[in-house]
Image (spheres, rainbow, N blue to C red):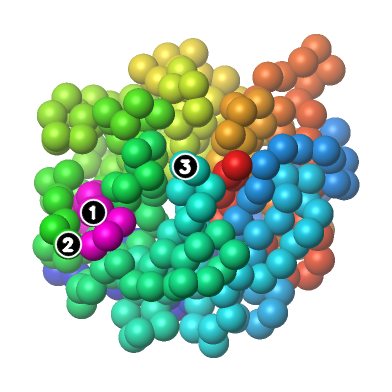
Amino acid sequence: MGTTVMGARPLPALSALSLVALMLAACGSGGAPVEPDGAVIFGSLPGRIVFSSFREGSQDIFVMNGDSTEQRRLTDDPVDASGPAWSPDGRFIAFASSRDGNVEIYVMNRQGTGQRRLTTDPSVDNLPAWAPDGVTIAFTSGRDGNSEIYLMNMAGGRVQRLTTHPAVDWGATWSPDGGSIAFTSDRDRNSEIYAVEIDGTGLRRLTDDPARDWYPAWSPDGESIAFVSDRGGHDAVYVMAADGTAVRRLTTGPARALEPSWSPDGEYVAYVSVQNGNWDIFAVRAAIGPDGPENWRLTTGEAIDWNPSWGR
């Protein structure tokens, strides 16, 4: 497990662990094991969440209701599958796997059936993200010698390169109108969040902080973007307006929080945090009330649970 090198640049990879795993290994556990403020085991939340877990040995894709009930396994392969992403209509799940010898993008029905490969390239293709049209998928790839954002049709065929820069560009998230993509890049010598139109024009920097800002997730109403930042001393989930203004911290406490994913109604944000020495999936209400953030713990156990994607 490690970073695949292409030339002199590191390429985000999902072989046995996700890109986040690599960053966790580099940064440590982030402090004493504690519960997030106000955490409750098993809340009542909407929709369905797909996620990656090592609970069966290898890393596989699982699904559960938003309230954590009816957890079941969707993939069963000795090779890791990770980074699941719901299609907008909830019918399909895209994910990354190296089951054919190289990390590629696959898609399956919501029940885990009909698994098929979408990309075929000697490089690493990972981190799929569905467009609102339910047909186009953005993903991260190093197929041209550097980590960039690409677009493809779910049916396969022509792949379009969206970003072009010698820096590492990765981790796409779509605006709800399908017109823009936000992503992480170190093109200005620091990990920041950028947005670009899907025709490659209108590049704009959304964060500008000496800290590391990464892993953006656009809200369903298009007004906000959740992201991860260590500007408060350790990784936590923040929310900003879609133009990069009005930044506020969403998760509190000394525990690290990563991988935000909005609920379909925009009322909650799922995230991953380490508690009692283990990584599990939590959710927090996006609107912070007078008593502080309201959290729910959705997974428990000794295995690593992460890569949440919240769908209908």
Quadrant occupied by the N terminus: bottom left
Residue 245, numbered circle: none
> How many labels sit on residues?
3
132 falls in the magenta region:
no
| Mark 3, residue position | 88
Q: Residues within 10 Å of mark 2 (few under 14, many from 20)?
A: few
| Mark 1, residue position | 152
Q: Is residue 236 left or right of residue 152?
A: right
Nearest to the observer: residue 257 or residue 312 = 312
What are the residue bounds of the magenta stretch?
146-156
Where residue 128 sits in the image (x, y, percent)?
Answer: 38, 55
Residue 35 shows in this picture = no
Q: Residue at x 71, y 34 (%)?
A: 284
Residue 157, numbered circle: 2
The reply to whether dot 2 and dot 1 touch (C-beta < 8 Å) is yes
Quadrant occupied by the C terminus: top right
Label 2 or label 1, whichever comes before in sequence order: 1
Label 3 or label 1, whichever comes before in sequence order: 3
Find the distance from the CA under tag 3 to the CA under tag 1. Answer: 16 Å
